[in-house]
Amino acid sequence: MPTIISILLMMAATLPAQQQKSARPNFRDFAIKQIYKGTPAKPKITKDWRTFRTRIRAGARSPVEFAGHYTVPRWGCGAGCIYFAIVDSITGTVYEGFSVADLSESWVDQHPEELQIQFHPNSRLFKVDGCIGEVKCGFYDYEMVDGKGLKLVREEPYREGAK
């Protein structure tokens, strides 16, 4: 009997830590100390990106937008849908993004201030509130990993009626 009580107490003690883990991370949790100020490198357009080369080249000329030395060229892919890539301003490497469509109309009406994608120049955190590939809907948090691209660190599938 004491063993069961000990196990229950240990489980209860870990519950607050598990709840904290599920909260969305803050941009400051992925802070970058230095932001690249040099001339952006010309993006390395592969044949996979050739269709979007004009948008990527134009977006890559922007000042750093994300994770200390990246730009995020983006373009429309239909009503309520955007597509993006991530370009390293130092090396010109183009990292694959994906399309993000709006969540349901009722959610958008209740949260007009929310953006489909959110990022900052001084943070490696990249937030997505929408439907990835216009199918997988929810709230997604990614970390930019140098040399690799976006790595999923948290996901919360969207449920209709949730706030």
Image (cartoon, rainbow, N blue to C red):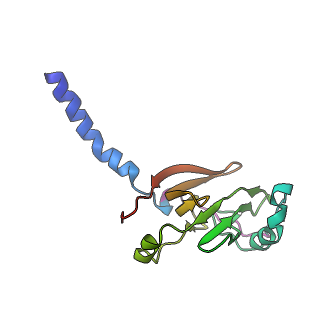
**Quadrant location of residue 122?**
bottom right
Judge left or right: residue 24 versus residue 136.
left
Residue 64 image point, x, y percent: 68, 69
| Magenta segment boundaries in residue numbering | 29-39
Outermost left residue:
1
**Image mark count:** 0
**Quadrant location of residue 31?**
bottom right
Judge left or right: residue 99 versus residue 1.
right
Judge left or right: residue 147 versus residue 140.
right
Residue 42 image point, x, y percent: 84, 65
Residue 98 image point, x, y percent: 66, 59
Above or below — where is 80 with respect to 97? Answer: below
Residue at 56% over, 50% down: 152
Q: Decide whether residue 91 is among the magenta residues.
A: no
Quadrant location, the N terminus: top left
The reply to whether residue 22 is in sight is yes
Q: Nearer the viewer, residue 83 or 78?
A: 78
Q: Nearer the viewer, residue 92 or 54?
A: 54
The reply to whether residue 41 is in sight is no
Judge left or right: residue 127 versus residue 68.
left
Quadrant location, the C terminus: bottom left
Residue at 29% over, 47% down: 16
Q: Main secondary structure of the magenta part?
A: loop
Residue 27 image point, x, y percent: 50, 62
Residue at 51% over, 58% down: 137
Residue at 47% over, 68% down: 104
